[in-house]
Amino acid sequence: MKSQIRNVLFTFLAAILLSGLTITADAKAAPKYKNMNLSVTVKTKTDVKISWNKQKGSDGYKVYRSEQIKEDKWSKAKKIATLPSTQASLTNKADYKKKYRYDIISFSKKGKKTKQEITDFCFAYVGVGQADWDAYLHCDAVTTPDSIRLLFHAGYWQGMKPDTYEIYRSKSKKDFKKIASVKQTKSNFGSNIYVDKKVTYQSSYYYKVRAFKILNGKKIYGKFSRPMLLSAVNSEGKFQVNVLTPQAESITSLDILLTSEKGNADAILNSKYVWDASCWSQTGGSVQFKYFYSLDGKEWKTFSEEAVILKPEGKIYLRFESEEGKAFPHPAVIKEKYDLSLYDLSYNRLTCYLKVNLITNTGTVQTNGEYYH
């Protein structure tokens, strides 16, 4: 996971970073970036070990180090070692709770000339790896009316491997209280899981997590993660559907009654979210719709800026009219897959879409991943 995270987050920056690299004077051009499979191990408050794959044709390696001064500012890189080609690791003395960047440059020699060939880089935090949530937890969290599932790890900075994580919870973003301790998984920086079952339906909770390591008999803590707000509701809203339009071979308009099940969050529909509707079947293909709603099944309206809130066990009538009067099959005459989609609505503070299965007469509200992934 360490290599994957580093590649995803930093490889695309390599060209930019290297174009401004002025860490050596004996090269006329910046070396080319190459993944050397760098790994970082921090075992104490003062020691960082970095290692990499030996490079074919290399006559040696130069190692440079820079220190993070601010969030987006680093000190000028300084050479800390020149190593022979047979050595592909280095243990460096560093300061506790500091963040460093290491650049490894492979070089070749021809006579008295030295040519920089390739380079790779890595980051290290000299402390306990800061705990953090999985990147998309806020939109992908698995929740129910009775539980909230949390996924967390030691963060993107490769510090000391934690022994244990502490989970804290609050209902107001203040006065957090510890609710659980979770042992680190065998994987160095793999995801850890905790399921909070002491929750109340429709209640929202802020969570924080931090990690610690026992070193010389004492607990050393990493920093707290950012707070994460999650709610005890169905993470995918569940709905029942009644088709109200009388059966016919083909229709140009379809009315349904949508009922939200108990356990759901509030669903909010208005012109801010709702922008498209369509259905698809193998027989009828894809059909685009104009859409309307009604609270009583009699007076039909288009969605406006005024929010229409569908509460758990609440009902709403929806009408879908084909654009330009195009005919499409009635659900009762279709036996294969037949889906209707409405984009978008707000559900559990997330932008979601409604997907109706017109064969089973059930619907789900699912996170619109395009907004978050």
Image: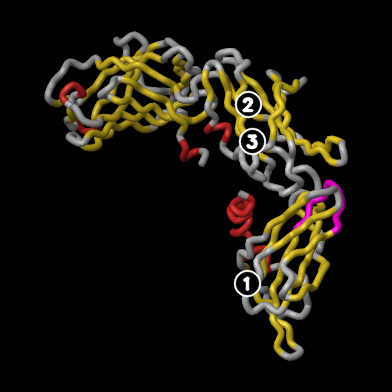
Along the line of sight, which residue is nearer the eye, 89 or 307?
Answer: 89
Relative vertical location of residue 314 with respect to residue 196 in this rendering, above or below: above
Residue at coordinates 65% horizontally, 66% vertically from top-left?
A: 53
Marks 3 and 2, Cα distance to the nearest angstrom? 14 Å
Dot 1, how many residues are within 10 Å of its Cα: few (below 14), some (14-19), or many (20+)? some
Q: Which residue is mark 3?
A: 152
The one of 301 and 142 positioned closer to us in this rendering: 142
> Residue at label 1?
32
Q: CA distance from mark 1 to mark 3?
A: 35 Å
- How far apart in space, not on screen, are marks 1 and 2 (Cα)? 43 Å
Amino acid of disc 3: Phe
Mark closer to the chain start, 1 or 2: 1
The residue tagged with tag 3: helix, strand or loop?
strand
Asked if the residue under mark 2 is in contact with the one under mark 1, i.e. CB atoms within 8 Å, the reply is: no
Residue 256 belongs to magenta span: no
The segment highlighted magenta reads 93-101
Name the residue type under label 2.
Leu
Protein image colouring = secondary structure
Judge depth for marks 3 and 2 and give the one in front: 3
Q: Is residue 99 magenta?
A: yes
Compared across the picture, whether 4 is left or right of 224 comes to: left
Tag of residue 347: none
Percent from the top left, x then y, of residue 217? 87, 37
Q: Secondary structure at mark 2?
A: strand
